[in-house]
Amino acid sequence: MGDSIWTFEAMDSLFFRDGKPMNAAESTWIESVFPPSGQTLQGAVRAAVLQYLGADIKAFQEGKPCLRDGSSLKEELGDHQTIGQLNLTGPFVCENGQPLFPAPFDVVRNEFGNHELLKPAPSPMESDLGPVRYPVASDMGFKPLAGSYVSAEMLRHFLNGKLEYVKPGCFSPLYAGEGGGGAPLTDREPKVGLARDNASRINEEGMLFAIAPVRPRKGVSLALKISGLKSSYYPDEPFLQRLGGEGKMARIKTHGVLSVPKPGSLTVDNGRIRFKIVLTTPGRMPQDGWLPADFQKYQTSDYQVWRGREAGCSFDIISACLGKSLKIGGWDMAAKQSRPLINYVPAGSVYFCEANADQKEAILGLHNKKTGTCTQYGCGHMMIGTW
Protein backbone atom coordinates (compact mmCIF):
# COMPACT_ATOMS: atom_id res chain seq x y z
CA MET A 1 0.00 0.00 0.00
CA GLY A 2 1.32 3.44 -0.88
CA ASP A 3 0.40 7.05 -0.22
CA SER A 4 -0.33 9.39 -3.08
CA ILE A 5 -1.30 13.04 -3.45
CA TRP A 6 -4.09 13.73 -5.93
CA THR A 7 -4.34 17.26 -7.28
CA PHE A 8 -7.64 18.53 -8.71
CA GLU A 9 -7.29 21.50 -11.06
CA ALA A 10 -10.56 23.00 -12.30
CA MET A 11 -10.95 23.49 -16.05
CA ASP A 12 -14.16 25.49 -15.46
CA SER A 13 -16.26 26.71 -12.57
CA LEU A 14 -17.16 24.06 -9.99
CA PHE A 15 -20.33 23.56 -8.00
CA PHE A 16 -20.32 21.73 -4.67
CA ARG A 17 -23.67 22.42 -3.06
CA ASP A 18 -23.89 23.55 0.54
CA GLY A 19 -26.12 22.00 3.19
CA LYS A 20 -29.25 23.83 2.13
CA PRO A 21 -31.98 21.54 0.68
CA MET A 22 -32.40 21.90 -3.07
CA ASN A 23 -36.01 20.89 -3.54
CA ALA A 24 -38.12 22.04 -6.45
CA ALA A 25 -40.21 25.14 -5.73
CA GLU A 26 -38.65 25.44 -2.24
CA SER A 27 -35.05 26.65 -2.60
CA THR A 28 -34.23 29.66 -4.77
CA TRP A 29 -30.55 30.28 -3.91
CA ILE A 30 -27.92 27.60 -3.42
CA GLU A 31 -24.33 28.41 -2.50
CA SER A 32 -21.36 26.34 -3.54
CA VAL A 33 -18.77 25.40 -0.93
CA PHE A 34 -15.03 25.37 -1.54
CA PRO A 35 -13.10 23.32 -0.74
CA PRO A 36 -15.57 20.42 -0.87
CA SER A 37 -15.63 17.72 1.77
CA GLY A 38 -13.68 14.49 1.56
CA GLN A 39 -17.02 12.68 1.15
CA THR A 40 -17.42 14.49 -2.17
CA LEU A 41 -13.93 13.83 -3.50
CA GLN A 42 -13.87 10.17 -2.49
CA GLY A 43 -16.51 9.56 -5.14
CA ALA A 44 -14.26 11.16 -7.76
CA VAL A 45 -11.33 9.01 -6.58
CA ARG A 46 -13.42 5.84 -6.80
CA ALA A 47 -14.60 6.70 -10.31
CA ALA A 48 -11.04 7.46 -11.46
CA VAL A 49 -9.68 4.16 -10.13
CA LEU A 50 -12.48 2.17 -11.75
CA GLN A 51 -11.91 3.81 -15.10
CA TYR A 52 -8.13 3.38 -14.87
CA LEU A 53 -8.49 -0.34 -14.13
CA GLY A 54 -11.07 -0.80 -16.90
CA ALA A 55 -13.74 -2.00 -14.48
CA ASP A 56 -17.36 -2.75 -15.37
CA ILE A 57 -19.03 0.20 -13.61
CA LYS A 58 -22.50 -1.35 -13.53
CA ALA A 59 -21.17 -4.59 -12.05
CA PHE A 60 -19.28 -2.62 -9.40
CA GLN A 61 -22.45 -0.74 -8.45
CA GLU A 62 -24.27 -4.04 -8.05
CA GLY A 63 -21.48 -5.48 -5.87
CA LYS A 64 -20.52 -8.06 -8.49
CA PRO A 65 -17.07 -8.92 -9.88
CA CYS A 66 -16.10 -6.00 -12.09
CA LEU A 67 -12.55 -6.89 -13.21
CA ARG A 68 -11.43 -9.61 -15.57
CA ASP A 69 -9.72 -11.47 -12.73
CA GLY A 70 -13.03 -11.75 -10.88
CA SER A 71 -12.40 -9.01 -8.31
CA SER A 72 -15.29 -6.86 -7.15
CA LEU A 73 -13.15 -4.03 -5.66
CA LYS A 74 -15.80 -3.46 -2.98
CA GLU A 75 -13.33 -4.24 -0.19
CA GLU A 76 -10.82 -1.76 -1.62
CA LEU A 77 -13.14 1.05 -2.75
CA GLY A 78 -16.29 0.58 -0.67
CA ASP A 79 -19.67 1.65 -2.00
CA HIS A 80 -22.16 4.51 -1.65
CA GLN A 81 -22.26 3.93 2.13
CA THR A 82 -18.66 2.93 2.94
CA ILE A 83 -15.18 4.00 1.87
CA GLY A 84 -13.49 0.57 1.85
CA GLN A 85 -9.73 0.65 2.43
CA LEU A 86 -9.41 4.26 1.33
CA ASN A 87 -8.03 6.68 3.91
CA LEU A 88 -8.12 10.36 2.95
CA THR A 89 -6.41 13.42 4.39
CA GLY A 90 -7.71 16.79 3.24
CA PRO A 91 -8.69 18.19 0.86
CA PHE A 92 -6.39 21.21 1.12
CA VAL A 93 -6.43 24.35 -1.00
CA CYS A 94 -3.18 24.87 -2.91
CA GLU A 95 -1.76 27.86 -4.74
CA ASN A 96 0.96 27.25 -7.33
CA GLY A 97 1.40 23.77 -5.91
CA GLN A 98 1.93 24.93 -2.32
CA PRO A 99 -0.65 24.06 0.36
CA LEU A 100 -2.65 26.79 2.09
CA PHE A 101 -4.44 26.37 5.40
CA PRO A 102 -7.43 28.11 7.02
CA ALA A 103 -6.35 30.98 9.25
CA PRO A 104 -6.72 29.71 12.85
CA PHE A 105 -9.61 31.32 14.71
CA ASP A 106 -7.33 32.44 17.53
CA VAL A 107 -5.67 34.90 15.11
CA VAL A 108 -7.68 38.12 15.32
CA ARG A 109 -7.41 41.61 13.84
CA ASN A 110 -8.97 44.99 14.63
CA GLU A 111 -10.00 47.84 12.35
CA PHE A 112 -6.54 49.42 12.66
CA GLY A 113 -4.83 46.34 11.21
CA ASN A 114 -3.37 45.16 14.52
CA HIS A 115 -3.20 41.41 15.09
CA GLU A 116 -3.32 39.34 18.26
CA LEU A 117 -3.41 35.70 19.27
CA LEU A 118 -6.24 34.84 21.63
CA LYS A 119 -5.56 32.75 24.71
CA PRO A 120 -7.62 31.62 27.70
CA ALA A 121 -8.21 34.33 30.27
CA PRO A 122 -6.28 34.00 33.56
CA SER A 123 -9.57 34.08 35.50
CA PRO A 124 -12.73 32.14 34.65
CA MET A 125 -16.00 33.71 33.60
CA GLU A 126 -19.36 32.41 34.80
CA SER A 127 -21.55 31.01 32.03
CA ASP A 128 -24.14 28.32 31.36
CA LEU A 129 -21.22 25.87 31.12
CA GLY A 130 -19.96 26.92 34.52
CA PRO A 131 -16.80 28.93 35.27
CA VAL A 132 -14.72 28.75 32.07
CA ARG A 133 -11.50 30.47 31.00
CA TYR A 134 -12.80 31.79 27.70
CA PRO A 135 -10.31 33.03 25.05
CA VAL A 136 -9.79 36.80 25.26
CA ALA A 137 -7.95 39.60 23.48
CA SER A 138 -6.28 42.60 25.09
CA ASP A 139 -9.03 44.99 23.97
CA MET A 140 -12.38 45.26 22.23
CA GLY A 141 -12.83 45.24 18.46
CA PHE A 142 -10.73 42.22 17.47
CA LYS A 143 -12.33 39.75 15.08
CA PRO A 144 -11.18 36.38 13.67
CA LEU A 145 -10.08 36.15 10.05
CA ALA A 146 -12.58 33.43 9.19
CA GLY A 147 -12.63 32.56 5.51
CA SER A 148 -8.97 33.51 4.97
CA TYR A 149 -6.08 31.21 4.14
CA VAL A 150 -2.39 31.38 5.00
CA SER A 151 0.74 29.67 3.73
CA ALA A 152 2.32 26.71 5.48
CA GLU A 153 5.17 28.97 6.61
CA MET A 154 2.80 31.52 8.16
CA LEU A 155 0.83 28.77 9.90
CA ARG A 156 4.10 27.50 11.37
CA HIS A 157 4.68 30.92 12.95
CA PHE A 158 1.15 30.91 14.40
CA LEU A 159 1.73 27.42 15.81
CA ASN A 160 4.78 28.84 17.58
CA GLY A 161 2.77 31.78 18.95
CA LYS A 162 4.54 34.38 16.78
CA LEU A 163 2.91 37.35 15.06
CA GLU A 164 5.96 39.41 14.12
CA TYR A 165 6.09 37.77 10.68
CA VAL A 166 2.59 38.91 9.69
CA LYS A 167 2.78 41.12 6.57
CA PRO A 168 0.20 42.92 4.42
CA GLY A 169 -1.44 40.46 2.05
CA CYS A 170 -0.46 37.29 3.91
CA PHE A 171 -4.13 36.46 4.54
CA SER A 172 -5.82 35.40 1.29
CA PRO A 173 -9.64 35.53 1.31
CA LEU A 174 -11.33 32.50 -0.13
CA TYR A 175 -13.77 34.54 -2.24
CA ALA A 176 -13.31 37.79 -4.13
CA GLY A 177 -14.93 40.75 -2.40
CA GLU A 178 -14.32 39.47 1.12
CA GLY A 179 -11.76 40.67 3.65
CA GLY A 180 -8.27 39.34 4.12
CA GLY A 181 -5.96 41.80 2.38
CA GLY A 182 -4.36 39.29 0.02
CA ALA A 183 -5.36 38.15 -3.45
CA PRO A 184 -8.61 36.14 -3.41
CA LEU A 185 -8.40 32.47 -4.27
CA THR A 186 -11.74 32.05 -6.06
CA ASP A 187 -14.60 33.96 -7.67
CA ARG A 188 -18.29 33.25 -7.33
CA GLU A 189 -20.20 33.06 -10.62
CA PRO A 190 -23.95 33.21 -9.84
CA LYS A 191 -26.29 31.65 -12.37
CA VAL A 192 -30.06 31.96 -12.64
CA GLY A 193 -32.24 29.25 -14.14
CA LEU A 194 -35.84 28.17 -14.39
CA ALA A 195 -37.83 25.06 -15.18
CA ARG A 196 -39.67 24.96 -18.49
CA ASP A 197 -42.65 22.99 -19.71
CA ASN A 198 -41.24 21.39 -22.86
CA ALA A 199 -44.69 20.97 -24.40
CA SER A 200 -45.71 24.61 -24.11
CA ARG A 201 -42.18 26.06 -23.94
CA ILE A 202 -43.37 28.27 -21.08
CA ASN A 203 -41.63 28.52 -17.75
CA GLU A 204 -43.23 26.70 -14.84
CA GLU A 205 -44.61 28.80 -12.00
CA GLY A 206 -42.39 28.92 -8.88
CA MET A 207 -39.47 27.12 -10.53
CA LEU A 208 -36.96 29.96 -10.57
CA PHE A 209 -33.64 29.13 -8.92
CA ALA A 210 -30.08 30.41 -8.66
CA ILE A 211 -26.77 28.73 -7.89
CA ALA A 212 -23.33 30.19 -7.22
CA PRO A 213 -20.57 28.01 -8.73
CA VAL A 214 -17.00 28.80 -7.74
CA ARG A 215 -14.18 29.44 -10.21
CA PRO A 216 -10.72 28.89 -8.69
CA ARG A 217 -8.25 31.52 -9.85
CA LYS A 218 -5.15 30.67 -11.86
CA GLY A 219 -2.82 28.39 -9.93
CA VAL A 220 -5.43 27.43 -7.31
CA SER A 221 -6.18 23.73 -6.96
CA LEU A 222 -7.19 21.08 -4.43
CA ALA A 223 -4.87 18.44 -2.99
CA LEU A 224 -6.00 15.21 -1.36
CA LYS A 225 -3.73 12.64 0.29
CA ILE A 226 -4.89 9.07 -0.38
CA SER A 227 -3.74 6.01 1.54
CA GLY A 228 -4.85 2.40 1.67
CA LEU A 229 -4.71 1.39 -2.00
CA LYS A 230 -2.11 -0.45 -4.01
CA SER A 231 0.08 1.94 -5.95
CA SER A 232 -0.86 0.04 -9.12
CA TYR A 233 -4.43 1.36 -8.71
CA TYR A 234 -3.30 4.98 -9.10
CA PRO A 235 -3.38 6.52 -12.60
CA ASP A 236 0.20 7.34 -13.56
CA GLU A 237 -0.65 10.08 -16.07
CA PRO A 238 -2.78 13.26 -15.69
CA PHE A 239 -6.36 12.81 -16.86
CA LEU A 240 -9.62 14.74 -17.16
CA GLN A 241 -12.72 13.84 -15.17
CA ARG A 242 -16.07 15.39 -14.34
CA LEU A 243 -16.23 16.88 -10.87
CA GLY A 244 -18.98 18.49 -8.83
CA GLY A 245 -22.70 19.02 -9.20
CA GLU A 246 -22.65 20.40 -12.73
CA GLY A 247 -20.23 17.79 -14.02
CA LYS A 248 -17.59 20.29 -15.10
CA MET A 249 -14.16 19.03 -16.04
CA ALA A 250 -11.14 18.92 -13.74
CA ARG A 251 -7.58 17.86 -14.48
CA ILE A 252 -6.38 15.26 -11.98
CA LYS A 253 -2.83 14.12 -11.46
CA THR A 254 -1.09 12.01 -8.84
CA HIS A 255 2.33 12.81 -7.43
CA GLY A 256 4.53 12.63 -4.32
CA VAL A 257 4.13 14.11 -0.88
CA LEU A 258 2.35 17.16 0.51
CA SER A 259 4.45 19.06 3.05
CA VAL A 260 2.79 20.36 6.21
CA PRO A 261 4.25 22.64 8.92
CA LYS A 262 6.10 21.12 11.84
CA PRO A 263 4.42 21.33 15.27
CA GLY A 264 5.00 24.33 17.48
CA SER A 265 7.70 24.26 20.15
CA LEU A 266 6.26 23.05 23.47
CA THR A 267 7.77 24.16 26.76
CA VAL A 268 7.19 22.91 30.30
CA ASP A 269 6.02 25.43 32.93
CA ASN A 270 5.63 24.21 36.52
CA GLY A 271 5.22 20.65 35.35
CA ARG A 272 2.52 21.51 32.79
CA ILE A 273 2.47 22.02 29.03
CA ARG A 274 0.13 24.46 27.33
CA PHE A 275 -0.68 23.57 23.74
CA LYS A 276 -3.39 24.08 21.16
CA ILE A 277 -4.98 21.85 18.58
CA VAL A 278 -5.77 23.55 15.27
CA LEU A 279 -8.20 21.81 12.91
CA THR A 280 -7.20 22.23 9.26
CA THR A 281 -10.19 20.25 7.94
CA PRO A 282 -13.74 20.17 9.36
CA GLY A 283 -14.14 17.79 12.30
CA ARG A 284 -17.12 15.62 13.14
CA MET A 285 -17.13 15.43 16.92
CA PRO A 286 -19.28 12.82 18.69
CA GLN A 287 -19.94 14.72 21.93
CA ASP A 288 -22.05 17.90 22.16
CA GLY A 289 -21.09 18.69 18.57
CA TRP A 290 -17.58 19.88 19.49
CA LEU A 291 -15.85 17.38 21.80
CA PRO A 292 -13.83 14.25 20.93
CA ALA A 293 -15.27 10.97 22.18
CA ASP A 294 -13.40 10.39 25.45
CA PHE A 295 -13.72 13.82 27.07
CA GLN A 296 -15.92 14.65 30.04
CA LYS A 297 -16.54 17.74 32.16
CA TYR A 298 -14.21 18.08 35.12
CA GLN A 299 -14.32 20.75 37.80
CA THR A 300 -10.91 21.88 39.01
CA SER A 301 -10.59 23.97 42.16
CA ASP A 302 -11.09 27.17 40.13
CA TYR A 303 -12.74 26.49 36.79
CA GLN A 304 -14.36 24.01 34.42
CA VAL A 305 -12.30 21.90 31.97
CA TRP A 306 -12.96 18.89 29.76
CA ARG A 307 -10.64 16.00 30.62
CA GLY A 308 -9.94 12.95 28.49
CA ARG A 309 -7.63 11.05 26.14
CA GLU A 310 -6.88 11.29 22.45
CA ALA A 311 -4.74 8.63 20.76
CA GLY A 312 -3.18 7.64 24.10
CA CYS A 313 -2.49 11.24 25.16
CA SER A 314 -4.13 12.54 28.37
CA PHE A 315 -4.92 16.26 28.62
CA ASP A 316 -7.46 18.91 29.56
CA ILE A 317 -9.33 21.10 27.10
CA ILE A 318 -9.44 24.53 28.76
CA SER A 319 -11.56 26.33 26.16
CA ALA A 320 -11.86 26.71 22.40
CA CYS A 321 -12.33 29.12 19.50
CA LEU A 322 -15.01 27.48 17.38
CA GLY A 323 -16.50 28.93 14.25
CA LYS A 324 -20.08 28.64 13.11
CA SER A 325 -21.19 25.03 12.79
CA LEU A 326 -20.68 23.68 9.28
CA LYS A 327 -23.49 21.53 7.87
CA ILE A 328 -22.36 18.79 5.48
CA GLY A 329 -24.75 16.51 3.67
CA GLY A 330 -24.32 15.56 0.05
CA TRP A 331 -26.12 13.46 -2.49
CA ASP A 332 -26.67 9.69 -2.28
CA MET A 333 -26.37 8.62 -5.92
CA ALA A 334 -27.56 5.07 -5.23
CA ALA A 335 -30.68 6.14 -3.33
CA LYS A 336 -31.08 9.27 -5.49
CA GLN A 337 -31.76 11.48 -2.51
CA SER A 338 -30.01 13.96 -0.23
CA ARG A 339 -27.92 12.63 2.62
CA PRO A 340 -28.81 13.78 6.15
CA LEU A 341 -27.23 17.06 7.21
CA ILE A 342 -24.60 16.64 9.94
CA ASN A 343 -22.94 19.40 11.97
CA TYR A 344 -19.16 19.68 11.77
CA VAL A 345 -16.68 21.86 13.63
CA PRO A 346 -15.26 24.13 10.89
CA ALA A 347 -11.64 24.12 9.78
CA GLY A 348 -9.63 26.79 11.60
CA SER A 349 -11.14 25.98 15.00
CA VAL A 350 -8.70 25.97 17.91
CA TYR A 351 -8.74 23.96 21.16
CA PHE A 352 -6.65 25.32 24.04
CA CYS A 353 -5.28 22.45 26.12
CA GLU A 354 -3.02 21.62 29.07
CA ALA A 355 -1.24 18.40 30.00
CA ASN A 356 1.35 17.08 32.39
CA ALA A 357 4.99 17.36 31.30
CA ASP A 358 5.31 13.59 30.79
CA GLN A 359 2.78 13.83 27.93
CA LYS A 360 5.01 15.95 25.70
CA GLU A 361 5.94 13.24 23.20
CA ALA A 362 2.37 11.98 23.05
CA ILE A 363 1.16 15.52 22.36
CA LEU A 364 3.63 15.96 19.51
CA GLY A 365 2.41 12.61 18.20
CA LEU A 366 -1.03 14.14 17.59
CA HIS A 367 0.40 16.49 14.96
CA ASN A 368 -0.72 15.65 11.42
CA LYS A 369 -3.19 13.07 12.76
CA LYS A 370 -7.02 13.13 12.71
CA THR A 371 -9.60 13.28 15.48
CA GLY A 372 -13.34 12.69 15.83
CA THR A 373 -15.31 10.41 13.53
CA CYS A 374 -15.31 10.06 9.73
CA THR A 375 -11.53 10.43 9.80
CA GLN A 376 -11.19 8.06 6.81
CA TYR A 377 -12.88 10.79 4.77
CA GLY A 378 -10.26 13.34 5.81
CA CYS A 379 -12.17 14.95 8.66
CA GLY A 380 -10.57 16.34 11.83
CA HIS A 381 -6.99 16.85 10.62
CA MET A 382 -4.96 18.32 13.51
CA MET A 383 -1.87 20.46 13.93
CA ILE A 384 -0.24 21.14 17.30
CA GLY A 385 0.89 24.57 18.47
CA THR A 386 1.66 26.44 21.67
CA TRP A 387 -0.12 29.22 23.57
Image (cartoon, grey):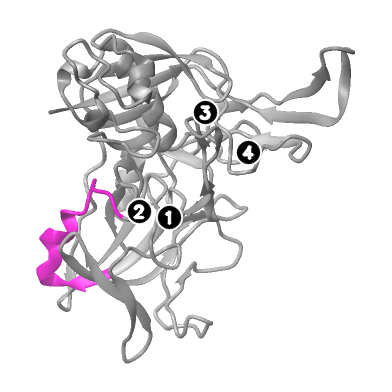
In the rendered image, which residue does mark 3 sit on? Answer: 185
Q: Which mark is residue 278?
A: 2
- Nearer to us in this view, 281 or 262: 281
Helix, strand or loop at label 1? It is loop
Residue 51: where, in percent of width, then height? Answer: 33, 12
Sooner in the amino-acid sequence: mark 2 or mark 1 = 2
Helix, strand or loop at label 4? It is loop
Residue 298: where, in percent of width, then height? Answer: 32, 83
Image quarter of the N terminus: top left
Q: CA distance from mark 4 to mark 3?
A: 11 Å
Sooner in the amino-acid sequence: mark 4 or mark 3 = 4
Sooner in the amino-acid sequence: mark 4 or mark 1 = 4
Task: Report the residue at 62% width, 53% height from top.
Answer: 111
Front tag of 1 and 3:
1
Q: CA distance from mark 1 to mark 3?
A: 21 Å
- Nearer to us in this view, 243 or 278: 243
Q: CA distance from mark 2 to mark 3?
A: 22 Å
Residue 275: where, in percent of width, then height? Answer: 27, 63
In the rendered image, which residue does mark 1 sit on? Answer: 349
